[in-house]
Image (tube, rainbow, N blue to C red):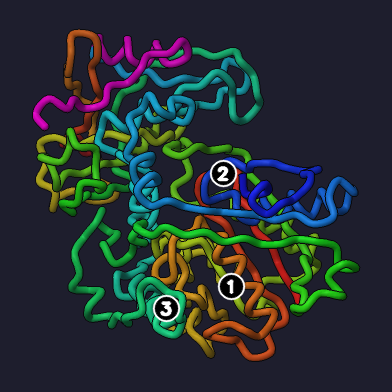
C-alpha cells in the first residue's frame, strides 16, 4: 500500500500554463480573450462564446471556501488507496473572486478539520510534490479586507 | 448475444447510450424515435450489471478510462476520488444556503427503506428509523453510509417499447410515453468533472423544461416519481431541479412526508437503488410502468402520470413521463 502513489495531473497543451505557474508558485487562471470569461479547469474553448482565443491571467490566490466534504469512512471503495491513510481529510472548493469567481478544488493546510467553514477566507500555498509537479493548496488567510 | 439466444432473426436498430446513469430514460427516447421513424417496430431496452465487474471498473486506474478524466487532473491529486465527492460538496453547500438538515436528508432513506420493505423483489427489506440514520456512520460527510446504495447486486432489467397501435393488442396495459428527452444544459460533463462555478444546479433543469413542455403537463400533475438514487442527495436535488418544489425547499418537502405513500409525490416506490437494487435507474422505469398498470408493491391510487428521472450526473441526463 505504501507504494501506491497519489494521482498526479497530466499536463496538456491547454493546461500547461496553470501547472507551470504552480511550479513557479504563481496562480494563473485561463480567460477567454474574446469575451473575457474566466474558466476553471482550463479548456480549449470558451463555455460562454465558444472562442479558442485564450490567455492566462495571474491572480492573487485569495479566495473563500465555497464548500467542502470530508471522507470519514474506512471502506476501500471510499477513496483512492493513496489517500486512505489520511482519512479523515477535507476536499474544498475555493471561490476566487479576482478570477471571475471560478471554483478550484484543493485541500486546506494549517487548519483543523472542525474549523473549516463555508465562507472562510483562504489563500493559496504551494506543495512541491515532485520535481515536475507543484500542487496549489490553501491555508486560512488572516487578512481582514 | 442476447438477440441470438432469443432467436431474433434480425436487428434493424441497435444503439448503446453512454453517460452512465444519465442514459436510462434516453434509451426509451431513442427507442421511441426509432419506432416513429420506422427504423424499428419493437425495441428492447436493456440494462444488466455484474456487481464485481462494475465495482472493479469504478475503481479502475486512470489508464482504463482516460477519456473521462479531462478535469480529473484537477480533482484526483487532491483526494477527490469519485463522483460522490461532487454530491457531497453540493449537499454541503445546499445545507449552508438553505438550512437543509441531516434529519431532513434522512427522511429520504426512511421513506425508501419502507418502500423496500413492501417490495418482494427488494435486496434490502428492513426499514430504518430516523434515529438509526442520525447515528449511522459517515461516508463522505455530509453523506452517510446509509445515504448510499450498496452497489453490490448482480441484476438485469428490460423495457419493451413499441407503437401505441401495436400495444393495443398486448396482454398488459400499455404505459404511454408522453415525453422522453435528453438534455445536457450548457455544460456537458463526464464522470468526474465539475463545471467551474455551479455547485448543485444540474442538467435536470434544462431536461425539465423540455420534458414538461413536450408532455404538456406540469410537475404538479405528476402522481408518482421514480428518481435515480445512488445517494439520497440526488433525489433531493431532483425534487428541486424538476420543479416539484422550489429551490431550497427539498428538506421541508421530504420532512412533511412528501415522498411517502399518501404524500404529495410518492417517490421510488420500489425502494429505488437504495433498497430494491442498483440497475442504473432502468429498474425505476419498470416501477413507473407498474404504477401505470396498477401492479406496484406500493401502488399510488389511480396513478395517471408517472415520472422517471435518470441520474442527475453525468450530463446529458434524461427523463420521461408515462401515462395510463
Q: Is residue A41 visible?
A: no
Q: Residue B62 at x, y = what percent?
A: 36, 27
Q: In front: B195, or B315?
A: B315
Q: Secondary structure at mark 3?
A: helix
Mark 1 vs 2: CB contact within 8 A: no
Q: Tell me where the magenta segment starts and ends, as one range.
A: A1-24
**Mark 2 or 3, nearer chain start:** 3
Q: Residue A132 at x, y = what percent?
A: 23, 9
The answer to whether B252 appears left or right of B18 in the picture is: left
Residue that numbered label 2 is attached to:
B315
B76 relative to B242, above or below:
above
Q: Residues within 10 Å of mark 3 (few under 14, many from 20)?
A: many
The answer to whether B248 appears left or right of B170 in the picture is: left
Quarter of the rendering occupied by the N terminus of chain B: top right
Marks 1 and 2: which is nearer the front?
Answer: 1
Q: What residue sits 74% from the left and 50% below the top?
A: B8
Residue that numbered label 3 is attached to:
B116
The answer to whether B33 appears left or right of A62 in the picture is: right
Q: In front: B189, or A38?
A: B189
Q: What residue sits 60% from the left and 49% below the top?
A: B23
Q: Secondary structure at mark 2?
A: loop
B277 relative to B293, above or below:
above
Residue that numbered label 1 is attached to:
B287
Amino acid at each position: 500500500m505504501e507504494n501506491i502513489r497519489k494521482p498526479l495531473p497530466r499536463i496538456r497543451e491547454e493546461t500547461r500554463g496553470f501547472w507551470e505557474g504552480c511550479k513557479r508558485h504563481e496562480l494563473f487562471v485561463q480567460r477567454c480573450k474574446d469575451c473575457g470569461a474566466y474558466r476553471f479547469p482550463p479548456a480549449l474553448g470558451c463555455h460562454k462564446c465558444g472562442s479558442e482565443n485564450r490567455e492566462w491571467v495571474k491572480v492573487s490566490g485569495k479566495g473563500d471556501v465555497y464548500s467542502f466534504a470530508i471522507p470519514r469512512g474506512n471502506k476501500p471503495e471510499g477513496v483512492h488507496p493513496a489517500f486512505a491513510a489520511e482519512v479523515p481529510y477535507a476536499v474544498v472548493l475555493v471561490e476566487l473572486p479576482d478570477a471571475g469567481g471560478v471554483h478550484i478544488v484543493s485541500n486546506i493546510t494549517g487548519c483543523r478539520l472542525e474549523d473549516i467553514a463555508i465562507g472562510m477566507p483562504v489563500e493559496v500555498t504551494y506543495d512541491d510534490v515532485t520535481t515536475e509537479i507543484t500542487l496549489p493548496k490553501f491555508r486560512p488567510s488572516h487578512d481582514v479586507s | 448475444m442476447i438477440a441470438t439466444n432469443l432467436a431474433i432473426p434480425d436487428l434493424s436498430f441497435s444503439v448503446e447510450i453512454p453517460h452512465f446513469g444519465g442514459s436510462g430514460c434516453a434509451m426509451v427516447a431513442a427507442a421511441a424515435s426509432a419506432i416513429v421513424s420506422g427504423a424499428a417496430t419493437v425495441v428492447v431496452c436493456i440494462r444488466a450489471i455484474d456487481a464485481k465487474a462494475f465495482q472493479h471498473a469504478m475503481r479502475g486506474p486512470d489508464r482504463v478510462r482516460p477519456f473521462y478524466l479531462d478535469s480529473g487532473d484537477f480533482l484526483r491529486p487532491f483526494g477527490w476520488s469519485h463522483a460522490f465527492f461532487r454530491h457531497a460538496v453540493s449537499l454541503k453547500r445546499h445545507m449552508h444556503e438553505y438550512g437543509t438538515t441531516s434529519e431532513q436528508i434522512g427522511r429520504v432513506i426512511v421513506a425508501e427503506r419502507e418502500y423496500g420493505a413492501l417490495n418482494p423483489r427488494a435486496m434490502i427489506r428492513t426499514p430504518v428509523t430516523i434515529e438509526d440514520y442520525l447515528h449511522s456512520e459517515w461516508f463522505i460527510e455530509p453523506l452517510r453510509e446509509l445515504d448510499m446504495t450498496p452497489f453490490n447486486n448482480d441484476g438485469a432489467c428490460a423495457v419493451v417499447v413499441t407503437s401505441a397501435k401495436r400495444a393495443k393488442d398486448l396482454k398488459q396495459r400499455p404505459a404511454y410515453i408522453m415525453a422522453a428527452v435528453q438534455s445536457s444544459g450548457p455544460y456537458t460533463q463526464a464522470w468526474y468533472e465539475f463545471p467551474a462555478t455551479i455547485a448543485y444546479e444540474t442538467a435536470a433543469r434544462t431536461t425539465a423544461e423540455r420534458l414538461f413542455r413536450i408532455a404538456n403537463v406540469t410537475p404538479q400533475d405528476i402522481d408518482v416519481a421514480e428518481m435515480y438514487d445512488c445517494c439520497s442527495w440526488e433525489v433531493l436535488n431532483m425534487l428541486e431541479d424538476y420543479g416539484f418544489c422550489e429551490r431550497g425547499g427539498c428538506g421541508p418537502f421530504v420532512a412533511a412526508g412528501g415522498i411517502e405513500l399518501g404524500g404529495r409525490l410518492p417517490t421510488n416506490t420500489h425502494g429505488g437503488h437504495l433498497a430494491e437494487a442498483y440497475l442504473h435507474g432502468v429498474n425505476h422505469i419498470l416501477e413507473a410502468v407498474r404504477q401505470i398498470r396498477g401492479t406496484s408493491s406500493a401502488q399510488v391510487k389511480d396513478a395517471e402520470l408517472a415520472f422517471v428521472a435518470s441520474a442527475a450526473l453525468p450530463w446529458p441526463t434524461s427523463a420521461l413521463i408515462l401515462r395510463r
